[in-house]
Image (cartoon, rainbow, N blue to C red):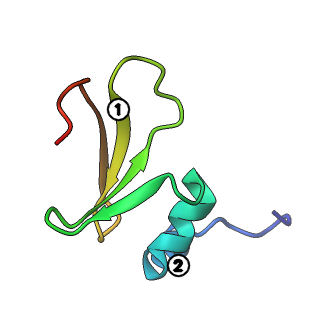
Amino acid sequence: MKPGKRLNLNAINKAALRDMPRFLDATFGAGNWFFDEGEKLYIAKNPKHRGKGFGFFAIRPDGSWFKGVVPEGRFQ
């Protein structure tokens, strides 16, 4: 970043929300996320999860998010 330039997080967040699939591909890698139509959530594999089960990030269309782990044997 050039001196005197301020990082505008609001602008970055708005840009990411306009094209969430592109943002998720760039952040998590293509094929490492999907959209759950029933829950209206983007689900991305957590690349830092090393334990048992499926570590994930869930991102709402408004940009808010949470993370968690689905235990082994709980997938449908």
Q: Is residue 36 left or right of residue 16?
A: left
Check contact, mark 2 vs mark 1: CB within 8 A.
no
**Residue at 32% across / 25% down in the picture?**
53
Q: Is residue 51 left or right of residue 53?
A: right
**Residue at 21% across / 69% down in the picture?**
37
Measuring from the top left, give residue 72's x and y in whole percent: 26, 23
Dot 1: few (<14), some (14–19), or many (≥20) neighbours within 10 Å? some
Q: Is residue 75 left or right of residue 50?
A: left
Q: Nearer the viewer, residue 62 or 70?
A: 70
Q: Nearer the viewer, residue 44 or 72?
A: 72
**Residue at 56% across / 52% down in the picture?**
28
Q: Is residue 41 above or below residue 66?
A: below
Q: Is residue 12 above or below residue 42?
A: below
Say which mark, if any, is on residue 15: 2
Check the image and name the residue furthest to the top: 51
Measuring from the top left, give residue 58's x and y in whole percent: 31, 51
Identify the element where label 1 is drawn. Answer: strand
Q: Amino acid at mark 1?
A: Phe
* Residue named by callout 1: 54
Q: Nearer the viewer, residue 14 or 72?
A: 72
Report, in whole angstroms, how far the alpha carbon at label 2 lies from the one at label 1: 29 Å
Identify the element where label 2 is drawn. Answer: helix
Q: Amino acid at mark 2?
A: Ala
Query: Which circle's residue, 2 or 1, is located before the other in the chain?
Result: 2
Measuring from the top left, give residue 30's x and y in whole percent: 58, 60
Measuring from the top left, give residue 17's x and y in whole percent: 43, 75
- Looking at the rendered image, the quarter that the C terminus falls into is top left
- Looking at the rendered image, the quarter that the N terminus falls into is bottom right
